[in-house]
Amino acid sequence: MNFLYQIGIHLFILLMRTASLFNQKIKKGIQGRNNWTKSLDDIPENANVIWFHCASLGEFDQGLPVMTALKQNTPNAFILVTFFSPSGIDHYQKREHPVDKALYLPFDTKRNARTFLKKANPTLAIFVKYEFWPNFISECARAKASIISISTLLRNKQIYFKWYGGFFKHALKKIDYFFVQNQQSKELLESIGVNQVEISGDTRYDKVIQHKNSSTSKDSVLSQFAVEGPILIAGSSWEVEEKIIKKYLESNTNTKVIIAPHNVSSNNIERIQSLLDCPSVRYTKYEEYQGNRVLILDTIGHLTSAYQYADYALIGGGFSGNLHNILEPAVYGLPVFFGPRHQKFPEAQSFIDAGIGFVIENAEELSEKLNVLGDKVELKQKIEGFIKNQSGATDKIVSHPFLTNN
């Protein structure tokens, strides 16, 4: 299987290069990996390198509380971050972070992995959530770098737990310690003989609380728009959510909406404005409130803080199986609505079980469930309490003997 994987990874690279001729995102990732070896040359000699690998921006947000805590505990640490996706490289600098260097992860060939480990020379390698590259893991082990995985989330359909997944199981067994999100992930690892596991929870709860506590400035546009409500905010919306909003506005004439689309291109903003039957205004063109019922965030970086100006949230991706972050609105006490395809996101089921998250299929269901939410103040306190009770994963990780003794 090892031999087949090495052939497979080279075929994968060939396919990626071919696809880059037709796909700009893939092309960006290919070009971003050019001359990656030189970008490691300016790591200081004898630096205490702690390497985080994050597939994309979402995983970076999960790793960020741990990065920050390790940097505080070890001021001389050099935080190196790799991404697979352009979304991470393009947007991580919009966060407050302690990163000393970030680059694309080279493709997982034996040669690339060996060169990367030799030049970066990390003392600790941290894989965030679920992206595990066998050659990099093997080279970490060979180089005597400690390896951990944080906020790990696993499902029984993954190759590690299939009869034909022996090669990939072997890669997981080389990881020294797992800090997993839930009991299912722990049991799956134990089923293949991996016992260095602790349920620590999801570090994103710590991340959203930290962001809320540090966001003290007010946004004049959002403050003015939200003076009179109620306000529904659509976070990272796709067309299906936007069509629901259109119908919802028709039957709820006293509600205003903030739409933060997943795609903020000018063409997509124009499509949304054409779809709606009521006055709307773009954030970048807002001057003063003139009766518009819809404010469209045509920017990147405002959404996380924008939730504080709303009363409830409809989060995108729940109709495609790629649900976006529901913790960000909940930290401000907002009940959260989303589509039915949320099975890959255990936090969604936790929200449903706690009575703070709600599945909808259409605008009618959205209206019905909003109308029976109950006392707004009590619900807000309940949601904020739930988020607080789920926090603490970062402290469990950084104070664990495996890290404090290494």
Image: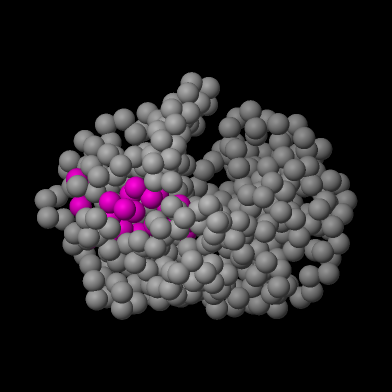
Q: Residue at x 65, y 32 (%)?
A: 268
Q: Quadrant of residue 370?
A: bottom right
Left or right: 296 in relation to 105: right
Looking at the image, which residue sits at the far left? Answer: 45
Of residue 222 and residue 395, the one placed in the foreground of this image is 395
Looking at the image, which residue sits at the far top? Answer: 21
Q: Up-down: is 287 above or below 171?
A: above
- In the rendered structure, does residue 113 fall within the stretch colored magenta? no
Q: Residue at x 75, y 55 (%)?
A: 340
Residue 15 image position (x, y, % from top left):
48, 28
Q: Is residue 273 visible?
A: yes
Q: Residue at x 72, y 35 (%)?
A: 273
Q: Up-down: is 139 above or below 262?
A: below
Q: Which residues are magenta?
A: 119-140
Q: Residue at x 70, y 78 (%)?
A: 378
Left or right: 330 in relation to 124: right
- In the rendered structure, does residue 138 fall within the stretch colored magenta? yes
Q: How many marks?
A: 0
Residue 67 image position (x, y, % from top left):
34, 61
Q: Up-down: is 32 above or below 240?
A: above
Residue 56 image position (x, y, % from top left):
46, 47
Q: Up-down: is 23 above or below 347?
A: above
Tell me the colour scheme of the image.
one colour
Residue 157 image position (x, y, % from top left):
60, 56
Of residue 116 and residue 156, the one placed in the foreground of this image is 156
Q: Is residue 232 visible?
A: no
Left or right: 318 in relation to 197: right
Of residue 205 and residue 131, the one placed in the foreground of this image is 131
Q: Looking at the figure, which quarter contains the C terminus?
A: bottom left
Of residue 202 and residue 259, the one placed in the foreground of this image is 202
